[in-house]
Image (cartoon, rainbow, N blue to C red):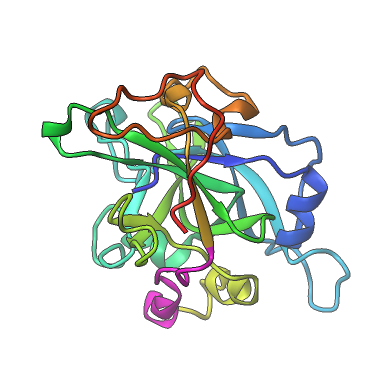
Amino acid sequence: MCGRYALTATSEEILEVMQALGEEGFPARYNIAPTQPILIVMQNEHVKPGSNLPPRRVVLARWGLIPGWVKDIKDFPLMINARSETAAEKASFRAAMRHRRVLIPASGFYEWRRPPKETGLPSQPFWIRPKNGGVIAFAGLMETYASADGSEVDTAAILTTAANHALRPIHDRMPVVIAPEDFERWLDCKNGEPRHVADLMRPVQDDFFEAFPVSDLVNKVSNMGKDLQKPVAVAQPQEKPPKASGSSGQMSLF
């Protein structure tokens, strides 16, 4: 799954990579958590053929998709991820897969490796980022939810797939990453049904990401500084786990 991620690029970098219109001034965010506002990229349907305007637009959405048919969100589970293998058939995601596919800009994501219980060690968080840096795009789904009082909120979920061989030692799932050359095809819901983009919902190549163990500071939503991504030494079974202010040593899985 993907339960935390970061977007630390400048507004200019995000808009340029996404080829999108949007307000500038997005702050760097090192610990984006469920239910918080996130940036999503949609097709700009108001751009006419031949226009010099960017073909996409950036908007804010709540991280946690709510289908339009939900009566009471208090009784509905928080859906921050959708399994790419089954999203087109699931009632909660079917309509969004057909009509509202989006891109979710990111600088990387966090994942937790869970040691065997007998080691006595806590789950170890990892910061996972593209080796070449820059802004990447997760595959996402969007729904606009209208509450009983008439208010509306855009909501979104990140599509996941099986982890590639390199990340499997940490977790068995990872976000679907859409390459820039596939942005248009992914977002074109008018001409492309889910079956037409099924080939895009696959793990990235093994050498795309690099992973570093980080402290448990990321476990708390209130921690938001760049020190969350500072590598730490990983405790072995006979050692005590590293503290939040632990070693500055680093270990890359790759």
Horizontal and vertical percent position of residue 4: 45, 38
Task: Determine which quarter of the picture holds residue 235.
Answer: top left
**Vertical placement of 5 versus 84: above or below?**
above
Number of marks present in the image shown: 0
Query: What secondary structure is the magenta-colored segment mainly?
Result: loop
At which x and y percent is residue 75? 22, 29
Residue 211 position in % (x across, y down): 48, 50
State yes or no: residue 101 in magenta.
no
Q: Residue at x 40, y 64 (%)?
A: 97
Query: Which region is colored magenta?
Result: 194-208
Seen from this angle, which residue lies furthest front?
Answer: 238
Q: Spot the residue most to the left.
A: 118
Q: Image check: 87 left or right of 142?
A: left
Position of residue 102 in the picture relative to residue 25 (left or right)? left
**Residue at (65% x, 45% y) in the render:** 59
User: In the displayed structure, does residue 69 sit left or right of residue 2?
Assistant: left
Occupied quadrant, residue 216: top left
Indicate left or right for 22 with 177 as reference. Answer: right
The residue depicted at 64 percent of the width and 29 percent of the height is 226
Q: Residue at x 43, y 82 (%)?
A: 196
In the image, residue 223 above or below residue 214 = above
- 201 is within the stretch colored magenta: yes
Closer to us: 176 or 53: 176
Identity of the residue furthest to the right in this view: 52
